[in-house]
Image (spheres, rainbow, N blue to C red):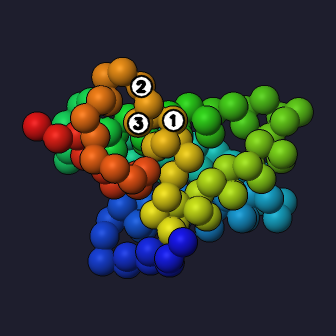
Amino acid sequence: MELAIETNKIDWWFWAIILAFILLALLGWVPAYYVVMIISGIQVFYFAQRDGGWAFTTQVRILYFFTTLVALWTLIRFPWFILLLLGTAMVTFTGRCVLALMLKKMPWNKGLPEGASCELKPQS
């Protein structure tokens, strides 16, 4: 797996900023949990506007946003954010995304190109 750090793309910056706040949350700054949720929600609206309401990139962000909301349950917040840390680090540094892999298998996403990047867009 190659590094895919693309600082010239806003997509990468969203993931990098979220990753930074996940780290802050895990280090004990409790408001960072909520910042992660807020930035994830902003991503949904940004990508829905940029790529279309139901584009693959938007679907990935919607699913990610809902996974951050699981952390509202304080009993599992810390271990859940460790999982989010791993997944977000993977997409930030390699461009590969477990959520995208899962979404690609959904029937409404048939015909997507090979790969599992969060930057995949459905073919017209």
Real-space Cα distance between discs 1 and 2? 7 Å
Q: Report the side of 95 relative to 31 (left or right).
A: left
Which residue is tagged 1? Answer: 102
Look at label 1 and name its amino acid: Met
Residue 73 vs 11, above or below: the answer is above
Q: Position of residue 104 (x, y in %)?
A: 41, 36
Q: Secondary structure at mark 2?
A: loop
Q: Are marks 3 and 1 in contact (CB under 8 Å)?
A: yes
Whether residue 124 is visible, yes or no, is yes
Q: Residue at x 42, y 68 (%)?
A: 13
Q: Residues within 10 Å of mark 3 (few under 14, many from 20)?
A: many
Q: Residue at x 36, y 21 (%)?
A: 107
Look at label 3 and name its amino acid: Lys
Residue 92 vs 52, above or below: the answer is below
Q: Position of residue 20 (x, y in %)?
A: 62, 67
Q: Secondary structure at mark 1?
A: helix
Q: Are marks 3 and 2 in contact (CB under 8 Å)?
A: yes
Which residue is tagged 3? Answer: 104
Real-space Cα distance between discs 3 and 1? 5 Å
View extreme (top): residue: 107
Residue 26 vs residue 4, the one in the foreground: 4
Q: Quadrant of the C terminus?
A: top left
View extreme (right): residue: 75
View extreme (left): residue: 124
Which residue is tagged 2? Answer: 106
Q: Secondary structure at mark 3?
A: helix
Q: Residue at x 41, y 66 (%)?
A: 12
Q: Position of residue 62 (x, y in %)?
A: 44, 34
Q: Position of residue 24 (x, y in %)?
A: 72, 64
Query: Which of the 4 quarters of the picture holds residue 25?
Result: bottom right
Q: Residue at x 44, y 31 (%)?
A: 105
Residue 95 vs 44, above or below: the answer is below
